[in-house]
């Protein structure tokens, strides 16, 4: 999710998230059980989850770590991610594809999914390409045959935060935005569409990270703070601008929930989020 890189555990001290070392150990154990060589595992990403390249195999694992503070049962999320990515890869859409036996598997008590390694660089997709790619993705997802939950990322994260935080902006904005979100149109979405979830590979940009796949309005997939007006304009479908503004506020509320659940110290980000969300209850400030 954009806005927050890594949240170091639960704020109430009742649960300890798996560490990066735990994720590496589980990844190696999973690889050995599947007959994959993993003599030189390399951590290539850390955040809500840890990704480990199983060198010398061209396979990458994903293990949810600090993300459990918001989503304590990651298995169904990883199952949906694998199923949707398999469907899209078989449809010919440019996605980072699951490995031949992706799981999710259980190793050392942790859920481990496996993915094909995709060579990529640090470049970022252009706004025009992102908007066009998002249109193609939505067209392909229309045909996905499985059931998907409604806006599962924001609704889950916000509900978790409401249980552990008394923050007034969180509860006031949730009371307004959650019923509104449940009234929106529903169609299959990426769920966490932002430029950081597009890898620049030698064969072109590829989608990745479908953990938040869900149903909801197309505007939710444009709510990330990384998506510019040029990207929105490049989207080939119709956009409801009022709903887009509301989706962006729901995104802000989701990020606020993440800050409140974890011990993530970013007063400037907190103040910015609260300032935007509090304007919803002050018509003169809009």
Image (cartoon, helix red, strand yellow):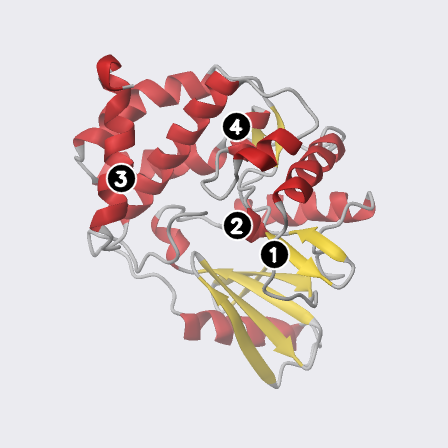
Q: Position of residue 127 (x, y in %)?
A: 61, 43
Labels 3, 4: front one: 3
CB contact under 8 Å: marks 1 and 3: no
How far apart marks 2 and 4 lie (CA) works out to 17 Å
Q: What residue is disc 3 on?
A: 272
CB contact under 8 Å: marks 3 and 4: no
How far apart marks 3 and 4 lie (CA) works out to 27 Å
Q: What residue is disc 1 on?
A: 104
| Disc 2 secondary structure class | helix
How far apart marks 1 and 2 lie (CA) works out to 7 Å
Sequence order check, earlier mark of 1 and 3: 1
| Disc 3 secondary structure class | helix
Residue 21, above or below 214: below
Q: Position of residue 36 (x, y in %)?
A: 70, 77
The disc label shown at residue 5, or none: none
Q: What residue is disc 4 on?
A: 150
How far apart marks 1 and 3 lie (CA) works out to 37 Å
Labels 3, 2: front one: 3
Q: Nearer the viewer, residue 159 or 265?
A: 265
| Disc 1 secondary structure class | loop
How far apart marks 3 and 2 lie (CA) works out to 33 Å
Sequence order check, earlier mark of 3 and 2: 2
CB contact under 8 Å: marks 1 and 2: yes
Q: What residue is disc 2 on?
A: 75
How far apart marks 4 and 1 lie (CA) works out to 22 Å
Q: Residues within 10 Å of mark 1 (few under 14, many from 20)?
A: many
Q: Residue at x 64, y 42 (%)?
A: 130
Residue 10, above or below 39: above
| Disc 4 secondary structure class | loop
């Amino acid at each position: 999710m954009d806005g927050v890189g890594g949240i170091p555990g639960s704020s109430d001290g009742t649960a300890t998230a798996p560490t990066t070392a735990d994720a590496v150990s589980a990844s190696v154990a999973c690889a050995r059980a599947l007959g994959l060589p993993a003599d030189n595992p390399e951590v290539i990403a850390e955040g809500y989850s840890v990704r480990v390249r199983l060198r010398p195999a061209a396979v990458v694992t994903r293990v949810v770590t600090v993300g459990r503070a918001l989503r304590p049962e990651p298995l169904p999320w990883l199952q949906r991610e694998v199923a949707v990515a398999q469907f899209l890869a078989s449809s010919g859409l440019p996605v980072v594809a699951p490995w031949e036996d992706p799981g999710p598997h259980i190793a050392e008590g942790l859920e481990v999914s496996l993915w094909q390694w995709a060579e990529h660089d640090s470049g970022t997709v252009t706004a025009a390409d992102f908007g066009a790619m998002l249109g193609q993705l939505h067209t392909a997802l229309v045909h996905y045959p499985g059931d998907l939950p409604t806006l599962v990322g924001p609704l889950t994260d916000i509900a978790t935060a409401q249980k552990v935080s008394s923050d007034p902006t969180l509860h006031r904005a949730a009371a307004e935005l959650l019923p509104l979100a449940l009234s929106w149109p529903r169609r299959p979405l990426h769920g966490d569409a932002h430029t950081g979830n597009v890898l620049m590979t030698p064969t072109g940009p590829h989608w990745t990270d479908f953990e938040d796949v869900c149903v909801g309005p197309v505007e939710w997939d444009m709510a990330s703070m990384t998506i510019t007006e040029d990207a929105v304009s490049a989207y080939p479908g119709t956009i409801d601008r009022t709903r887009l503004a509301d989706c962006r506020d729901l995104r802000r509320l989701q990020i606020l929930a993440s800050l409140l659940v974890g011990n993530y110290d970013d007063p400037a980000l907190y103040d910015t989020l609260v300032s935007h969300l509090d304007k919803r209850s002050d018509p003169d400030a809009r």
